[in-house]
Amino acid sequence: MGRRKNRRHSAEFRIEIAQQMLAGENVSELSSRYKIKRSMMYRWREAYLKQGPAGLQRRPGRPKGQGPTRVGNASAEPRLRQRIAELERKIGQQALEMDFFKGVFKRLEELPRTSRCGGTPSTRRSGE
């Protein structure tokens, strides 16, 4: 097997992959589909979580971890607050969905057994 030539992916592509991972897509499937190492995708996801889309932009000539998008800088604060608000909304939405499904399952358990199984059995139980 030959070595794969180093490829460069656009910032938009890296952001899309990170968002798909955060949305719960299967990482192995994404890796196979795009022919990208999973470890690379996890690095993209971590950069996206820490710095948002700016964390996946190319910064030529700068060492890693330096620049205006570092978490400690004041310029990152509004973006981080926006990300926190976005995640809090998502948590709220998921809580509502969980409450809905808990109610559905509770109602299903309250139904008589014959209703849940599709009607009366076609044969009698043994011993009746």
Image (cartoon, helix red, strand yellow):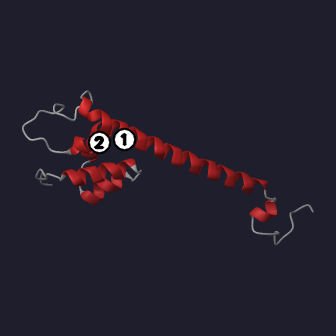
Give SS at disc 2.
Answer: helix
Farthest residue, direction right:
128
Q: Residue at x 30, y 33 (%)?
A: 77
Farthest residue, direction left:
61
Q: Quadrant of the N terminus?
A: bottom left
- For the residue carrying disc 1, how many other residues have a C-alpha within 10 Å: few (<14), some (14-19), or many (20+)? some
Q: Residue 43 or 94: which is nearer the viewer?
A: 94
Give SS at disc 1.
Answer: helix
Is 2 placed left or right of 100 in the picture?
left
Q: Amino acid at mark 2?
A: Gly
List the residue tagged with mark 1: 83
Q: Residue 49 or 35: which is nearer the viewer?
A: 49
- Residue 96 percent across, percent down from the top left: 58, 48
- Residue 11, can we see it? yes
- Residue 124 percent across, percent down from the top left: 87, 67
Quarter of the image where one finds residue 66: top left
| Tags 2 and 1 touching, CB below 8 Å | yes
Q: Residue at x 79, y 69 (%)?
A: 119
Q: Earlier in the sequence, mark 2 or mark 1?
A: 2
Quarter of the image where one finds residue 115: bottom right
List the residue tagged with mark 2: 52
The correct choice, above or below, for 102 with respect to 78 in the image is below
Q: Quadrant of the C terminus?
A: bottom right
- Residue 36, can we see it? no
The correct choice, above or below, for 78 with respect to 119 in the image is above
For residue 48, the mark is none
- Residue 123 percent across, percent down from the top left: 84, 70
- Residue 14 percent across, percent down from the top left: 24, 50
Q: Amino acid at mark 1?
A: Arg
